[in-house]
Image (spheres, rainbow, N blue to C red):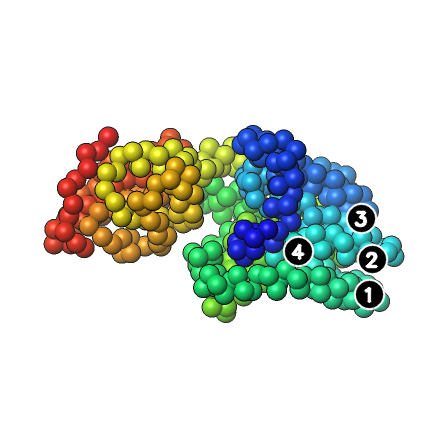
């Protein structure tokens, strides 16, 4: 628990589940990854139950499940040994309990699930706030009881906050954890997130894919029948994303991260499916066929390059190849933490890791650079043009790359003797 508190940016529930999971079946990679996979599958239970409690046609539920099954974003986080599958599962369970509360059932279940939710990830509060906004519109008479339950939820979080704040101060804030979070742009980041089933399509095809998924929204808005369900899904699908975008523009540090919006994924896909089935009969069947095919092709394309790199292998190769001490390893993104972990695991203290965002931050007479190959486009050539010596380095076969650099004599510092590339 002390390590969890020092982590600061994540509540403890997932770590407690993981500890119990390890005691149950050991710590092999296959067994550990089975935990988030299991949680992702369990998430289907509250999703289907919530749909059964609402006037959602079975065909819409079936199409939403199809889009979810062939969704590389959801598949990716179902394999990650992190809390996002748990966040997905509990957010859907919270929505199911929310529907039951609106139908007059006791509020205790909703409050308990939300307690687990916010102790899974801080973004769980976005789900709670979205439901309060919906309750104010759909059932104002129940809003007072829900506010009391939410106040109790906040009180239950006080012990954890009292532990985390001193830990955050002692580590100098959250810069080391979320300092790499860039401020989002409205079109490429916010709107781009909603290309969940057409993300890898390029150029005009990507625009077509986004249009294909936004078309049902227009059909839903034009309908004059009961709009409560589509609007509720729209709130659940957009409020966490838009709130995070707005806060990231004004807070000293951006909090934007697409993995946090996994709570909005299923409401969004259900909204798309529901709206699509409201299209005129002349185009409905063609739309269903196109969107189903796009989901499958998009998923297959994205899973070819899942951005999971074998940093352990690359770290060991680097450690064997390097014979100097006090060497900096520069990383673009959060791979610095992974490399540091594997260096600690082999007991190699010669390296220190630095996370950077641009090539001008590469300093020193000799250092290593770790990055995905798609980020490396042009970087090695730029370094060579300015006179630096760039080693071939090592590749993991999945798109991960780590290579050494020696600065030119008149450059950053005096150049060390080049290490022979392999």
Q: Could you say whether the residue bearing mark 4 is in a helix, strand or loop?
A: helix
Q: Earlier in the sequence, mark 2 or mark 3?
A: 3
The quadrant of the rendering that contains the C terminus is top left
Closest to the observer: 326 or 311?
326
Q: Measured from the top left, where is residue 71 in percent x and y? A: 58, 39
Q: Measured from the top left, where is residue 24 in percent x and y? A: 66, 33
Label 1 CA crowd tier, 10 Å (few <14, some 14–19, many 20+): few
Residue visible at 40% across and 42% down in the picture? 344
Whether residue 7 is visible: yes
Figure quadrant of residue 74:
top right
Query: Where does label 3 land, which residue?
Result: 54
Q: Measured from the top left, where is residue 27 in percent x and y? A: 56, 33
Q: Could you say whether the residue bearing mark 1 is in a helix, strand or loop?
A: helix
Figure quadrant of residue 137:
bottom right
Report the Cα–Cα distance between label 1 and label 3.
22 Å
Q: Could you say whether the residue bearing mark 2 is in a helix, strand or loop?
A: loop
Kindly identify which numbered label has been placed on residue 107. Answer: 2
Query: Where does label 4 land, which residue?
Result: 118
Query: Where does label 1 land, which residue?
Result: 145
Report the Cα–Cα distance between label 4 and label 3.
25 Å
Label 2 CA crowd tier, 10 Å (few <14, some 14–19, many 20+): some
């Amino acid at each position: 628990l002390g390590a969890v508190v020092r982590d600061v940016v994540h509540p403890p529930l997932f770590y407690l589940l993981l500890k119990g999971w390890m005691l149950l079946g050991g710590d092999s990679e296959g067994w550990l990854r089975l935990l988030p996979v299991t949680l992702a599958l369990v998430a289907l239970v509250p999703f289907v139950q919530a749909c059964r409690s609402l006037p959602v046609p079975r065909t819409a539920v079936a199409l939403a499940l199809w889009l979810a099954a062939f969704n590389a974003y959801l598949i990716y986080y179902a394999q990650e040994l992190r809390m996002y599958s748990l966040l997905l599962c509990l957010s859907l369970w919270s929505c199911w309990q929310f529907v039951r509360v609106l139908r007059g059932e006791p509020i205790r279940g909703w409050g308990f699930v939300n307690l687990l939710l916010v102790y899974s990830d801080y973004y769980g509060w976005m789900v709670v706030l979205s439901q309060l906004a919906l309750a104010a519109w759909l059932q104002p008479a129940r809003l007072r009881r829900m506010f009391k339950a939410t106040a109790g939820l906040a009180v239950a979080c006080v012990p954890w906050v009292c532990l985390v704040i001193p830990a955050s101060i002692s580590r100098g804030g959250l810069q080391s954890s979320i300092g790499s979070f860039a401020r989002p742009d409205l079109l490429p980041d916010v709107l781009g997130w909603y290309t969940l089933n057409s993300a890898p399509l390029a150029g005009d095809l990507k625009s077509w894919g986004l249009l294909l998924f936004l078309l049902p929204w227009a059909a839903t808005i034009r309908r004059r029948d009961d709009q409560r369900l589509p609007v509720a899904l729209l709130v659940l699908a957009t409020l966490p994303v838009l709130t995070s975008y707005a806060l990231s523009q004004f807070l000293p540090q951006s909090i934007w991260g697409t993995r946090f919006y996994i709570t909005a994924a299923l409401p969004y896909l259900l909204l798309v499916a529901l709206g699509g089935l409201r299209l005129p009969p002349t185009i409905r069947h063609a739309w269903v066929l196109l969107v189903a095919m796009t989901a499958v092709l998009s998923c297959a394309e994205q899973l070819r390059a899942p951005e999971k790199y074998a940093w352990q292998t690359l770290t060991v190769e680097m450690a064997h190849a390097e014979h100097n001490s006090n060497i900096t390893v520069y990383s673009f993104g959060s791979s610095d933490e992974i490399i540091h972990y594997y260096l600690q695991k082999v007991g190699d203290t010669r390296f220190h890791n630095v996370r950077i965002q641009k090539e001008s931050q590469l300093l020193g007479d000799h250092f290593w650079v770790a990055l995905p190959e798609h980020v490396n486009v042009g970087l090695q050539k730029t370094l060579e043009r300015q006179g630096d010596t760039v080693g071939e380095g090592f590749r993991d076969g999945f798109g991960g790359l780590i290579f050494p650099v020696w600065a030119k004599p008149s450059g950053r510092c005096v150049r060390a003797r080049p290490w022979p590339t392999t």
